Image (cartoon, helix red, strand yellow):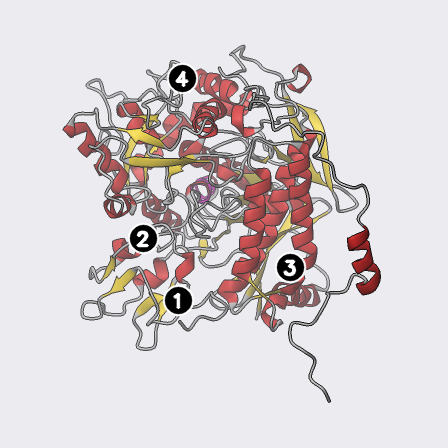
Amino acid sequence: MSTINGVRYDEKDYSWLNFDHGLCVRCGVCVDMCPMDVLHFGEHGYPYMRYRDDCWYCDVCTFVCPRQAISMNELPYLIR
Amino acid sequence: MYHVKQADLVIIGSGAAGTMSAIYAHRVDPKLKVVVLDKSKMETSGGAGRGMDALNTVALPPYSQPEDVVELLTKVTEGVLDQDVAYRFGEVCPRMVADLEQIMDRGKGDLFPVDEDGNYQLLYLHPINKPLLLPMDGEEMKRALAHAVRETGAEVMDRTPALKIITSDGKVCGVLAVNIRTGHYYYIKTKAVCLTTGAAGRMGLSSSGYLAGTYEFPGCSGDGYTMAYEAGAELVNMECFQANTLLKDHQGPSCGYVAAPRGAYTINPWEQRTWSHGYSSGDSKMGSWKRFAQGKGPIYLKMDHLPEEMIQIIEKIQWGNERTSRGLFHHGRQQDYRNANAVELAFAEEIGVCGGHSSSGVLSDVDGATCVPGLYVAGDVDGGLPHSYLGGALAMGGIIGEAAAHFAAGVPEPAQRSGLKAWLRKEAEEFEAPLRREGGLPTTLVEYKARTRVQYYLKPPKNPVFMEKAAWWMERIRQEDLPQIQAVDMHDLLKAHEIKSILRVGEMMARSSLFRDESRWGYQHWRTDLPAKKPEWDRAWVVIKKGPEGGMELEKRPVPGYKWDYPTAMEYAYPDLEFDTGPMFEKGPEWKNPTDDPWMKKHLDAQGMATPRLFMPKEED
């Protein structure tokens, strides 16, 4: 796991949100709307959970995505 | 990069209260230059970012009157209420409800239920015999409020937390803020500030260990409490802790305010109820605590006796509003509302303070004005209107927007600050110090340490030793750990900053609990060394403020005189904890050790206090 001091994560790291790259058009609405600043753009412009452990599992990202490209598969590991 | 801006009014925090402040300030004066700051994103920030299912306490004639709000708040606050503020809130409830319908473009009977005569249908929940809870289909509320704010032309600065409220001659004159995505700093000269930053809701740490697993929105880390304190404002009721019955591990609401008015209640595995009503006041918290203290937990939300139609209604409301991950959580845990003992609840998993859910916050009057001219507060950071929930945030948010706009119209622009550039550079360097550190302490580690100490030492029942230790830990972490904290980027830097607030609020909670030398509000301020209310503390606040020497000053201050003679006490008793655990092991006459220890003294003389030997033999040169 490529974290920096356990704060920042990479796209390949464990995540409870799934971003369907076939549906995502990289519009950035989820990155803009995430209330905890968890989501950021990855290497190819797709969103991912850069600050995963700040996620409040509020579901805003799945709600605002205009392409239904985001799904919350489960809750954070420590609380699921 | 540094930017200097000019405004008439700065609103810090754009949750329910902050958005209403902006809307009402614009109504008073459309030319008013308003800047809205939010550390998050206005459309989705705060406790109601994903919608809300009810206004928990509102007065809407003909079924309830402003006096009923006064009666409720007089009772649940047990003698620390400014009744004028409560009455003002009750008076403006109809206006606030009509505003919401208009802002959300929802007709009467759509957003809120009405009866056949067109009157709002209120439900019973509270520990008085009046209906004060108004259900709401409010999933879209926050985005509608945000849209209305943007329509006013206010300058909205998302991802831009305020760091400081600046005063000159004791009056508000500016706000310092930083954008955490660009790293740009802003000094905003202003005549007035509406502080609407929410609760101190990231204090204790729940047993899941997940730092963002909080009941309150995790961005609400008590910054408003700290900024107001540093600016010279007074805070009250910081000893009246928030300790909730919540969905175990999820930390979402126990669903009581949705389910209780519809027939649900809380029980333990032996079907013993925890309390007679489902309102989150100090008495019902004692009831939840009792079951765990008896070793008769866990507790559950009982719904399996309800008809299928009602269960589906509860599921629809709870899974589609406020915390929408609840359905997924229940599914993952194989929890079905139709089964007995399905929905496990936990109690007091994270201790914190909040005005809207409890009584703690910045002291304010009927206009939401604080003792600092130009500083107004509303919502969960407001201690002037306890137990007012979302309805109070919306209603008082509007009131402070109006009041601040009128105030701004009557005062001159603040003078240009001399040496501004150098001051800004110094502030930025101080804020960014954790970024320049190498090999320091990760923010997550320090936050974990602070919040575990808060939870362990501050969780009631309280005693003076635990409170002293809590205060000691807050100071120790401030002195030893903060100077070593390392942030990896701007996002992380905000975390380092928020930890300062957690420590300051934790200290306020400890010192205020020590100062009020009695017990009150059931579980919320239960001191085992003084387990009863004292008459001399009736109608008296503990007021905290920053003293002239920089230390925390506390004083006892009378609450404004009561105009309505409603009961000022809840129905509960503090239990006697000196229970009998039976006879202890008795030492016989042979159970005697020597009074000295020559064997250990011989070793001490030979080795001193040094570690006896190296783990690995020393290599020869």
Of residues B90 and B271, the one drawn nearer to the viewer in this rendering: B271
Disc 3 to disc 4, how far (Cα)? 50 Å
Disc 4 to disc 2, how far (Cα)? 42 Å
Q: Can residue B223 be seen in this view?
A: no
Q: In which quarter of the image is the C terminus of chain B?
A: bottom right
Disc 4 to disc 1, how far (Cα)? 49 Å
Residue at the disc numbered 2: A75
**Subunit of mark 1?**
A
Q: Which residue lies furthest to the top in this view?
A: B565
Tell me what residue is drawn at x 23 percent, y 33 percent. Answer: B314
Tell me what residue is drawn at x 51 percent, y 51 percent. Answer: B33
Choose the circle earlier in sequence order: 3 or 4: 4
**Subunit of mark 3?**
B
Which mark is in front, 3 or 4? 3
User: In the visual, does B24 lie left or right of B458?
Assistant: left
Residue at the disc numbered 1: A50
Residue type highlighted by circle 3: Leu
Q: Where is residue B569 in the image (x, y as percent from the top left)?
A: 53, 15
Which mark is in front, 2 or 1? 2
Q: Do callouts 3 and 2 point to residues on the same chain? A: no
- Residues drawn in magenta: B18-27
